[in-house]
Amino acid sequence: MAEMSLPRVVADGPLAVDVLELLAGKAEILPWPTEDSPPPRSVDAVYTFGHPRVDAALLDRLGPLKVISNYGVGVDHIDVAAATARGIPVGNTPGILDGATADLGFALLLAAARRVVEGDRYARSAEFTQYDPAYMLGREAHHATLGIVGMGRIGCEVAKRARGFDMTVLYHNRNRRPEQEAAFGARYVAFGELLAESDYVMLTLPLTDATRGLIGRDALARMKPTATLINVARGPVVDMMALYDALSTRKIWSAALDVTDPEPLPRDHPLLLLDNITILPHLGSATAQTRRKMAELSVENLLLGLRGEPLRHQVRA
Ligand code: 8YV
């Protein structure tokens, strides 16, 4: 019997063990093409694990593809319109990482409010020789006002958690969401009002042309001097230098970022030197359980696309 050749899939790596295990015997994994090397021949599909740029030029270099499958929800690194114009479906993994990402958003909120990371650094340092009740005063999370920018699936999960902390929940979104207002006691407000009223502003919206740089100098100037900015969305929604200026001059109290622009920040970036910022290396969905589900769904989308069948989740341009 003639040996069946496996579909050829270009992927950025190193891929997680889960993904490799699910693809074993089902696809041949090819390295991500570099600018100066000729692209691999006869490619059937693209699998994006981190956030490598997939633009029209890359699609043209790779030739006709059956599918692009993304490990994750956000597809701002993929030109979905260019893929759609070439008849290539783009798959993603919505609905399975909202809880994990909202948990992390809340972890960041509490860490910033109660100076958890700063306290840990101090408790381990040589300076900690005597307890002093006057140091490291934080700010309360319970009964504070939380402003959620982007009331999608993750925003709703954040709102749900906020109720347990007796928080007043404001939100801003492209469209009002009356069902969510009723379910989570959230109040729709204009963007400016959200910035001015919130003790915590949490970003849970996608990166698009409309949201790039949304939190710049103007937005930061409208926030309370006691406020904290939390970003679990995408780095470029926040202007990093405007944030640096606001934090270093204490125009806002603190920030907690799971995502930055670029990612990672250059090692000599001034934000890394500030005490009133907590930065994580993009851990929103990073739990063993959620990442396993993301691996399963993204591989399922890939294999369905390779067979020419509808994807479980297809991104529409
Ligand atoms: C992933 C994410 O970690 O789903 C998203 O949009 O940002 C994260 O859950 C990421 O896509 C994988 O690199």
Image (spheres, rainbow, N blue to C red):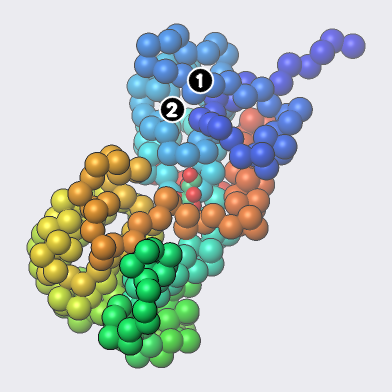
Closer to the camera in the image, 119 or 214: 119
- Left or right of residue 309: residue 126: left
Q: Earlier in the sequence, mark 1 or mark 2?
A: 1
Callout 2 environment at 10 Å: few (<14), some (14 to 19), or many (20+)?
A: some
What's the residue at 33%, 67% (across, down)? Answer: 127
Relative image position of residue 126 (x, y in whole percent): 37, 64
- Mark 1, secondary structure of its residue: loop
Give the residue number, with chain letter if any, for mark 2.
86
- Left or right of residue 129: residue 246: left
Image height of 256 relative to 69, above or below: below
- Left or right of residue 212: residue 152: right
Q: Decide if residue 119 is in sight here.
A: no
Is the CB–ligand 1 distance for label 2 below 8 Å?
Answer: no
Relative image position of residue 33 (x, y in whole percent): 46, 19
Relative image position of residue 63 (x, y in whole percent): 48, 17
Relative image position of residue 228 (x, y in whole percent): 26, 71
What residue type is disc 1 on? Pro
